Amino acid sequence: MKVIFRTTESFLESVRTDLIRPHPFAHERVGFITVRAAQGADHLVVLAQDYHPLADGEYLRDRSVGAMMGQEAIRKALDLALLNPVGIFHIHMHTLPGRRLWFSHIDLREQQRFVPDFFKVRPNMPHGAIVLSPQSAAGLAWLGPTEIVPIAEFNFVGTQIKIVRSSGDGSTDFYV
Amino acid sequence: MTDDRDFTRQSFLGPNSEQILAGARAVIAGLGGGGSHIAQQLAHVGVGNIRLIDPQSIDKSNLNRLVGATADDVKCSTPKVAIARRTILGIRPWIEVKAEQRKWQEVDHLIRDAHVLFGCVDGYQQRDYLEGAARRFGIPYIDIGMDVTEVAYGVFAVAGQMIMTRPGCPCMRCLGFLTADRLAREENRYGDAGINPQVVWTNGMLASLAVGAFIKLLTPWFSVNDHYTWLELDGNSQTISASRQPDYTARFASCPHHGGKDGVGDPFFALPSRSR
């Protein structure tokens, strides 16, 4: 099943603005986006609903990674999915320019640890992880605890509709 | 490059405009006088995936304006979506066309993963519902409509509008186009609508404005920072101008209609059980 992640450009800009704020000790910020979904003719559409940034105190001191979430942050995200009919997508941003936009090995390892847990509280919704660049996005969607697919297409709806398509491995152009 | 893949005459739309349009998915709800024009134009500009929805078949009274229709279609009562499909594929056979002779509410999966929804329907209520669907699935909505009013005995005023709205910005209710009064008057007229006059040239003008709005949304041709577009056509003087109606309408900081943040997605959505 091909997945589209769709949001307004203004929503995405507000997320980017939050994620680039400096943190007292973490090298980057992270957050969660709640989503709704709809099955289209050819694609599963994931629609961004709201953004939930981590509070400053919810980061752990860990110099080996850009940002490490504490248990309280993950518990809050699980609560969001438990109490609302929403999927949860972890989100962070890569600002150092590259040719392709994709997760780091550490990102991929850590996602595997916490994303499947969202199915314990909201099994009927897609969950996942997204990485932003200043212009683009790439990501993975979990359609089940072990069923992971790259997000095939991002739609950013603003004055113009920006359609970003990923290659087979899920990566996208860093600049589009 | 095949013979039907030469887009040099519209290359000013931007360096990747051919690929952008070929990768776009557009839905047209209503394939009458306006929608049939839009279908034809989307095929010409090279939109790669066009979805057509209309429950009706052609009637002899449609032949004055339905682009692509023939006398044989009237004899055979050809579905309007079949006529539009034939027109599109006659222009560019590689376009993927999905056509449903149903009410749009019965096939809204065609809308959900599209990029833009064109509404070419009669009546304010249907427009309201269609715009609601576009909001729910996070896509821009482009509406066209025309009306002919007898302003004095034997004197007719032809007028129409093209409105483009998009998620996160004012909707047609916010702009003052859809009002409680208009919706109520239409509801009270139900069953007594009479003949709805339509003519091909006015339909064509409005359809062209709609396709222009679509191209602006998709390609980098003409960058504008509008939160909406509302163009009014005076069919008698054949002039088009930006509507001033929104200037006289109380504005909301954000659109309070269509459910807000909770109004997105399919409220009954559930992943297939095989995935869990």
Image: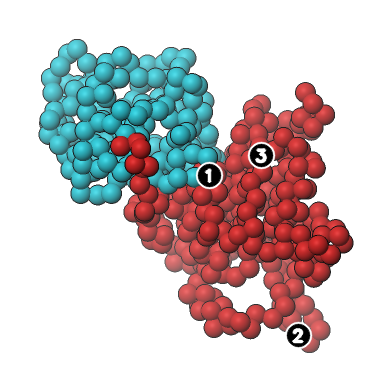
Chain colours: A cyan, B red
Question: Distance between the Cα atoms at labels 2 and 3?
Answer: 47 Å
Q: Of circles 2 and 3, which is in front?
A: 3
Is residue B199 something that shows in the picture?
Answer: no
Q: Secondary structure at mark 1?
A: loop
Against B255, is B4 above or below? Answer: above
Which residue: 77% across, 64% down?
B77
Q: Amino acid at mark 3?
A: Glu
The x, y position of residue A46, in whole percent, is 40, 41
**Left or right: residue B231 compared with residue A164:** right
Q: Image point 56% across, 64% down: which residue?
A: B127
3D distance between C-alphas at marks 2 and 1: 49 Å
Viewer-side residue, A156 vs A139: A139
Residue A91 in percent (x, y) is at: 31, 30
- x%, y% of residue B269? 37, 49
Give the residue type at disc 1. Answer: Ala
Q: Residue at x 69, y 58 (%)?
A: B31
Report which residue position mark 2 lands on: B152
* Residue B205 horizontal/vertical position (percent): 75, 57
Q: Amino acid at mark 2?
A: Ala
Which residue is label 1 attached to?
A: A41
Whether labels 2 and 3 share one chain: yes
Mark on residue B96?
3
